[in-house]
Amino acid sequence: SSYQGALTLKMKLELARVVRGTGRLGVLRGLGRTAQHSLEVPGCLLYTHLGAVPHLTQDTLHTLSSLPSVTQVTLAEHQEVLEEFKDGFRKFAGLHDTLLYCSLHDSAAPCPTGYTTNKTVSVWGSGGRIELTVAKFMALQKAVQPDWYQSMADGETWQNNTSRKRVRKSVDRTLAHLDECLLAHQNSQVKNTRVGVVEGGDIPEERVRSARETAKRPVAGFCLDGLQTGSMDQALRTQLIAAVTKELPEEKPRSVLLGVGRPDEVLACVEVGVDLFESFFPFQVTERGCALCFSFNISLDPEDTAGETQHNGDVSLDDQTRMTSFEMNLKDKRYHDDFRPLVEGCGCYCCKNHQRAYLHHLLVTNELLAGVLLTIHNTAHYQGFFSALREAVAGDKLDILRRRVLRERKE
Amino acid sequence: SSYQGALTLKMKLELARVVRGTGRLGVLRGLGRTAQHSLEVPGCLLYTHLGAVPHLTQDTLHTLSSLPSVTQVTLAEHQEVLEEFKDGFRKFAGLHDTLLYCSLHDSAAPCPTGYTTNKTVSVWGSGGRIELTVAKFMALQKAVQPDWYQSMADGETWQNNTSRKRVRKSVDRTLAHLDECLLAHQNSQVKNTRVGVVEGGDIPEERVRSARETAKRPVAGFCLDGLQTGSMDQALRTQLIAAVTKELPEEKPRSVLLGVGRPDEVLACVEVGVDLFESFFPFQVTERGCALCFSFNISLDPEDTAGETQHNGDVSLDDQTRMTSFEMNLKDKRYHDDFRPLVEGCGCYCCKNHQRAYLHHLLVTNELLAGVLLTIHNTAHYQGFFSALREAVAGDKLDILRRRVLRERKE
């Protein structure tokens, strides 16, 4: 295709294992300007809030092992200063060697609906709504200088009961935006790698149409949009994803980024062929003063229930801000004299140096260090889960992992 | 004296230089359980908010050079859990090798007056007021296990226009508390080093009486209380401190901790013989989104005014939370496209890696990383000022330093 940029060609997804119903295992190679980066799949991008990992300096961040090589950013409100700075967001933010993936919306901040037109979409930053045309969107990409960017899309059909007409319009608009992005791309100096966005709400035929049409365009990968928690139940989501991934070329990565991050959801998506996720979930857990504590050790005897089963709360499908069963609420009084690490055996800085009782005290006294320590633990824990996930796909042990992850739930 | 504990004897202030009106220079040696620590004077303690350095892990903290060897804590609300933990606060908080100095009040949180009785004083934590008797106070020290603790004191006479009768009562009560502490100390297993507190409000005769009487007791050092910003002007404060230090033995350290932290105040106190301070000031500067930027480089040509003179705000004597002329307000729009480091030539992690424009963006978008980066810079800058201060005392250059620090003020 004449659209195809030189750099896109360097990127290659090497799949080591693809078994329908048990996920895809592989490595995305040749990423970045000099093709020096790679990313294992299933994997996740490093979540940032407006370009910064909450609470952590780059140096502290890089003390974590197995960090994703791709950082996800949403930067519409930085456009002006980045245009003046000229050297792109990576340098502006003093980021260490990383790939940048530019998303449209922040996963941890749900965006209101009703602001999309045929020619514009709206995104929300700390200063309120910013309306983007394709021209403004492409100027933003030029200022941010990401390695990947997600094409502009009308994603307002994630809510239940969106009409078929509205869903159809969202698919059409998203394809039109993509075509306009590709055209602008061709005519501009921006040589980033673009990701096509698959819409279609909860209507299988529209999902399939969106996937087929997007796959015809020269995109480097696919982002399945509008599947966030609260919009549909997991069975329907899985069915829609399966219908979509069947239409997509095997050699290009598929991501489900916006609003899907709980380990049970990630597992279900991986089983139907999704490769990439965002890591906004550990950030949300941190913000509510909780610590991830679910088990993902598949080498343990699956019958072993000697581990902790004291998790509180319940999996809530309709509220992303509510506590889940994968975490412990460290503000709870029960932890005030619990002198164990957050997770026994965890190798993170927080668990190696501090006990639950100390975290409890930091939280109840509103100490700012709590957020730092929880970010370190929750990020490490979530990355550990993704390592276990790849190991499980490789060893055909997704079932064991699912039972391990969900063991505290009565089913 | 029969009060004197074995460990107190190990501590020794070696004074290299004492010139009335130009400060004392020396090293406090033999600190800590195994006498392995030392602390240069003039110097400052590491401020913590309820035992945690805001925003920083111990590992990040220890990437800073020339960190004080003494950490200041106020921990009344941790008493219960520390009694259960048994191994002291240093271990509870996972602190690196440091001395602990236990203060009564948090310098960055002014405490209401009107809650002192003959037998009790009140302290304020995040959960509200905690009333302490000497017995409860000594039990707290036993649980915290600090290396130094400040004796219980009635410090409610810092406000202007406190009556002579009330000031006299505060001196009497504070001496009575000290005697009770010493007695309890003698009868308990607590072998910490106690610091006597000098009260006396703004009445010179009461200051002198408090100093003389405290100096008769077996204390390891003296803390001059009730001199905080807003309570009196600097000339009166200097006069009171001079009257007090004349009464104190040369070989024991004198501190002015609560509420005195601005560089001009520190300079004035050092000139009349004060050795130790707290570092709550850089924390307050961080909390208001500002960066310390005053110059303390005494090797520069004193006539050189090529440096930055764009500081805003003014020195406010009556509000600790208001911005001072020693800092820059990074939220100000002028910094949105300022791609310089906070302070040219500063070697801290923040200045080496980030520009003012990035800090501005973190602050206006409420990014949590802003507090981390500002804490790193402001702590490093304040420690740098204390290094320069010692250098100035050593080289008889306090005048040059004062002019350097205050150069942006019209006088």
Image (cartoon, coloured by chain):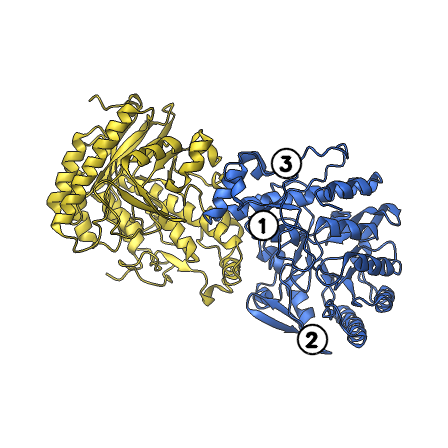
Chain colours: A yellow, B blue
Q: Disc 3, disc 1: CB below 8 Å? A: no
Q: Which residue is mark 3?
A: B346
Relative image position of residue A337 (x, y in whole percent) = 51, 64
Q: What is the quadrant of the C terminus of chain A in the image?
A: bottom left
- Relative placement, left or right, of B200 versus A343 is right
Q: Could you tell me the amino acid type at mark 3?
A: Cys
Residue shown at the point (46%, 41%) measured from the top left? A64
Q: Which residue is mark 2?
A: B116
Relative image position of residue A171 (x, y in whole percent) = 17, 41
Chain to which mark 2 belongs:
B
Chain to which mark 3 belongs:
B
Q: Which residue is mark 1?
A: B286
* Secondary structure found at label 1: helix
Relative image position of residue A264 (x, y in whole percent) = 28, 51
- Relative placement, left or right, of A237 versus A329 is left
* Secondary structure found at label 3: loop
Say yes or no: labels 3 and 1 on the same chain: yes
